């Protein structure tokens, strides 16, 4: 049975590559249109488009599944679609176009963390467990009937990149396990329970600003959840910004809020009733570096926080 794969970013491209290597008959790929990326704003194909072309699979590019895309899908005699971070909500005509349906791999234990950024939101909120869910797409936002899910522990050193990498592998395993039943019509579907939790919306740059008037633990969660994108950051009293790529909370070390200290060669900043150890930072206009190298290069006393 020919299958459509819809996705856009790197983790979706890795899923596509592994499914094809495992013998899943992906005959058509749907991805978002080329985008202007980088400092030079070069028109760039999505990672999924790049991998699809490497594998010799025809590619459709669209930011919506409209009548022309549906026509292409029908012409390929496709009845089943796998969706991994395509980034488009499907409307009724698209949902009705495939007899077996559209199936989404979502990186949370639904119904928790529905939305675009479940991995980041789980980390920012200090979750200790998350997982992967496979479900049949309906007209809502990640509200369709569940096929299966796999939990995983969020490790204390996980950031959004490492956690997404692990969830991607779990998602591939889950797809390979459940696809035969979906195709054969023997899969079991469970409606999602009602859940009043927050939607996992995309993390804005404003949200990524560190607040040292809160606890060091919350600051650490924000750093981990925003690594690599959009990157946790703070202002300095010198009028420059500093990105923080890696940091860990220390509950038993109390410093003045926003004040930096070098202790045994390690850099700490004071938070509410605790501190945050800065491991890797990036000053404005410079490359990433160890926090200790950055601190030793300072010509004057620096304080971190919000400054008018």
Image (spheres, rainbow, N blue to C red):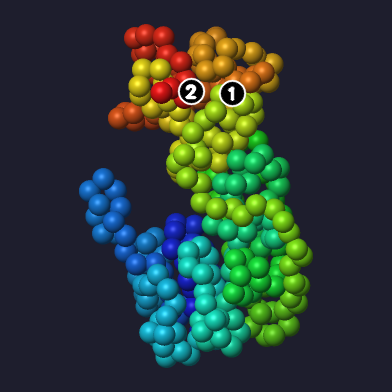
At 55% across and 9% down in the image, what residue appears? 264
Instruction: Decide which of tag 1 and tag 2 comes sooner along the chain.
Output: 1
Q: Residues within 10 Å of mark 2 (few under 14, many from 20)?
A: some
Residue carrying label 2:
305
Residue carrying label 1:
213
Please identify the quarter of the rendering in which residue 104 is found: bottom right
Disc number for residue 25: none
Tell me where residue 140 appears, x and y as whole percent: 61, 70
Compared with 85, 306 (above or below) is above
Tell me where residue 190 appears, x and y as whole percent: 76, 72
Q: Is residue 231 left or right of residue 135?
A: left
Toward the viewer: 266 or 90? 90
Compared with 117, 191 (above or below) is below
Q: Secondary structure at mark 2?
A: strand
Tell me where residue 1 appears, x and y as whole percent: 55, 86
At 49% across and 73% down in the image, what residue appears? 5
Q: Is residue 97 left or right of residue 146?
A: left
CB under 8 Å between callouts 1 and 2?
yes
Please identify the quarter of the rendering in which residue 111 is found: bottom right
Tell me where residue 157 appears, x and y as whole percent: 61, 35
Compared with 284, 77 (above or below) is below
At 24% across and 55% down in the image, what residue appears? 42
Report the number of discs. 2
At 56% across and 86% down in the image, what residue appears? 96
């Amino acid at each position: 049975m020919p299958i459509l794969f819809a996705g856009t970013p790197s983790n979706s491209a890795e899923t596509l590559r592994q499914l094809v290597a495992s013998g899943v008959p992906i005959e058509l790929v749907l991805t978002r249109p080329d985008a202007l990326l980088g400092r030079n704003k070069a028109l760039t194909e999505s990672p999924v488009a790049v991998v699809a072309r490497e594998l010799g699979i025809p590619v459709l590019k669209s930011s919506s599944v409209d009548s022309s895309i549906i026509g292409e899908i029908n012409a390929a005699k496709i009845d089943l679609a796998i969706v991994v971070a395509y980034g488009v909500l499907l409307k009724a005509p698209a949902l009705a176009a495939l007899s077996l349906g559209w199936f989404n791999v979502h990186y949370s234990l639904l119904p928790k963390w529905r939305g675009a950024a479940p991995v980041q939101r789980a980390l920012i909120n200090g979750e200790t467990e998350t997982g992967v869910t496979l479900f049949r797409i309906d007209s809502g936002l990640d509200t369709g009937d569940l096929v299966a899910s796999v939990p995983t522990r969020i490790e204390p050193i996980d950031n959004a990149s490492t956690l997404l990498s692990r969830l991607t592998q779990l998602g591939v395993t889950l797809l390979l396990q459940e696809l035969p039943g979906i195709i054969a019509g023997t899969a079991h579907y469970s409606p999602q329970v009602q859940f009043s939790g927050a939607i996992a919306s995309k993390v804005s740059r404003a949200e990524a600003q560190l607040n040292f008037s809160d606890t060091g633990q919350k600051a650490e969660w924000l750093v981990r959840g925003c690594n690599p994108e959009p990157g946790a950051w703070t202002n300095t009293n010198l009028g420059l910004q500093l990105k923080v790529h890696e940091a860990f909370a220390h509950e038993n070390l109390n410093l003045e809020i926003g004040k930096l200290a070098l202790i045994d060669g390690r850099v700490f900043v004071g938070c509410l009733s605790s501190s945050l150890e800065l491991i890797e930072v990036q000053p404005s206009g410079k490359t990433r570096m160890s926090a200790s190298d950055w601190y030793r290069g300072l010509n004057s006393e620096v304080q971190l926080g919000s400054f008018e």
